[in-house]
Image: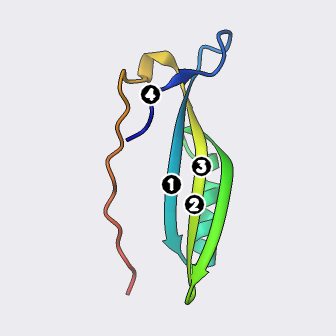
Amino acid sequence: TAPAATPASPSSGMHVIPIKISVSGTYEQVMAFAGAIQSGPRLFLVTAFGLSSVKGLFTGDLTGNVYALPSIVLSTATATPVPTTTAP
């Protein structure tokens, strides 16, 4: 569950929605995801990034903020976990 959105600043008209994401894959996949999330269609800024590895499987832990206009921010933000799949 994501916390409620808070105004970025009174003059910007934007709201900040804090997000935490954990992604696993090869080093290249994790780094590509971290780059893509910042250049995708949503305004997302990574504020912290951690990387760990166990037997060649890398896990990236990203913390960041999504910025949204008040007209599209729901009164209560909820996140639905996405099922993970492992490539053969």
Q: Amino acid at mark 4?
A: Ala
Pointer 4: what residue? 4
Q: Position of residue 21 (x, y in %)?
A: 50, 54
C-beta proximity under 8 Å, tags 4 and 3: no
Label whose residue precedes the other's in the sequence (4 or 1): 4
Q: Quadrant of the C terminus?
A: bottom left
Q: Within 10 Å of the Cα at label 2, are there few (<14), some (14-19), or many (20+) other Cα atoms?
A: some
Pointer 2: what residue? 61
Q: Amino acid at mark 1?
A: Ile
Label whose residue precedes the other's in the sequence (3 or 1): 1
Q: Which label number is shown at residue 1?
A: none
Pointer 1: what residue? 21
Locate residue 86: give its quadrant. Answer: bottom left
Lateral position of residue 61 relative to residue 48, left or right: left
**Nearer-the-camera pick, 37 or 8:** 8
SS of the residue under disc 2 = strand
Q: Position of residue 56 (x, y in %)?
A: 57, 87
